[in-house]
Image: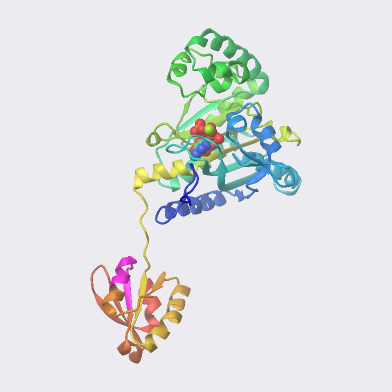
Amino acid sequence: MAKLTALRGTRDLISPEILRWQEMEETARRVLSAACFTEIRTPIFERTELFERGVGEATEIVSKEMYTFQSRSGDRMTLRPENTAGVVRAYLERGLRAKAPSPLKLFYIGPQFRYERPQKGRSRQFHQIGVEILDSADPRVDAEVILVACEYLRAMGLEDLTVDLNSLGDPVDRAPYRAALVTYLTSVRDRLDPDSVERIDRNPLRVLDSKAESTREALKNAPSILDFLGDGAAAHFEAVRAHLAACGIRHRIVPGLVRGLDYYSRTTFEIQSERLGAQATICGGGRYDGLVEELGGPSVPAVGWALGMERLAIVLDAVAGPPRERGPVAFLIAQGDEAVRAVLPLARDLRRAGVACELSFVKGGFGKQFKAADRHGAKYAVVLGEDEMAKGTASVKDLSTGEQTEVARDDLAEHLTR
Ligand code: ATP
Ligand code: MG
């Protein structure tokens, strides 16, 4: 039989790497809860139609990257390639607009699936932390989502990342811009990569997103969307910038920063790290005032972002080094029938007091058991021998210094937490 392996573009997260993932998740819950976002968990698979409408059939994601299958009853379903469509579906289906305070602030953490070519920072099952704020057009809400992304990254120890910012204007601004862009792209057509040539008519804004060197060069004199903003969008953009400045958030204006979907409007932004190489974007987001309507709801302005956890983990490893295994605080070693019987309830009591405690399941003498304590990376070995049992004590050995003290068993938890 062929060896069973994980599928290409997927992988197992095990200790010590998993510690970093727990930290990313716990910190997200803490920082986002402090900003009064509540968590939402939507299903990992949804009707294919949700993504066709909610992400857009002209996008790479829908046209090339989805894991779509038929259930036994013949329904078409898809492993979610992103989470915003699912959140908006739930918002409408569960009537959250009427039930919850407005604007509604949600966050999610979980796996997403895209059929892509796996490389550093790009996998087929990947994980995102994301936020959405629904039902507000206030520029402070745009600044709020960017602020909370920066605060999260700061809490993870990353302070010097820059925010790239742009405005896509309103749909009425975009029509003339699109026309100007198509004219320009047509004039430099022979310098564009084949994918971009194909997009000139289908999705010209997406060309601005191209990573091909020749295309990037050819785009140098492309018209800027910022010259096409109407009064409303221009004022909104200036207000977002002012609120970011008030928070001390440095940002660059990048007129080529687009999302190729019609329901995006006004603010778009990305947070990048040079440490990532080709896949530099850790976090990307923007305002999507047209999406709720696109999915059959009323007109509800909204803004959000998604952050790639694999990419964040790469940056954190580069900055702080890979995470290290945390051994137990106490490793219990017993000798003699009475001590062996005492060791499990003692472990229970220490754990109840908050001491991370492991016990020796090794059969053999003290020497062998001390070796096991070392292998577990324990801080202290706690020894129960016949002597200690008789006296109601335990011998505590600091495994880094070798220092040994005898402690009354009743005081053990206090001694180990001190
Ligand atoms: P890219 O241009 O890198 O493909 P994207 O525009 O497709 O990114 P979004 O859909 O905006 O990405 O998702 C937000 C974030 O999720 C990205 O900035 C990235 O950090 C992460 N991400 C997206 N696709 C993948 C993937 N296949 N593997 C790992 N992380 C990913
Ligand atoms: Mg992509």
Is 159 located above or below residue 216 in the figure? below
The answer, for residue 292, to whether it is visible in the render is: yes
Residue 188 location in percent, x, y? 50, 9
The answer, for residue 243, to whether it is visible in the render is: no
Q: Does the stretch in magenta take in 381?
A: yes
Is 343 located above or below residue 135 in the figure? below
Residue that extends furthest to the front in the rendered view of this protein: 1
Residue 235 location in percent, x, y? 60, 24
Residue that extends furthest to the left in the rendered view of this protein: 402
Residue 224 figure quarter: top right
Q: Does the stretch in magenta take in 296?
A: no
Residue 262 location in percent, x, y? 65, 26
Front-lying residue, 140 or 229? 229
- Colour pattern of the rendering: rainbow
Location of the C terminus by quadrant is bottom left
**Image: magenta residue range:** 371-382
Q: Residue at x 74, y 47 (%)?
A: 94
Indicate left or right for 161 with 406 as reference. right
Q: Residue at x 52, y 35 (%)?
A: 116
Is 284 located above or below residue 191 in the figure? below
Q: Residue at x 38, y 75 (%)?
A: 361
Residue 214 figure quarter: top left
Indicate left or right for 139 with 275 as reference. right
Count of numbered badges drawn on the protein: 0
Front-lying residue, 401 or 78? 78
Residue 407 location in percent, x, y? 32, 82
Indicate left or right for 84 with 121 as reference. right
Residue that extends furthest to the bottom in the rendered view of this protein: 390
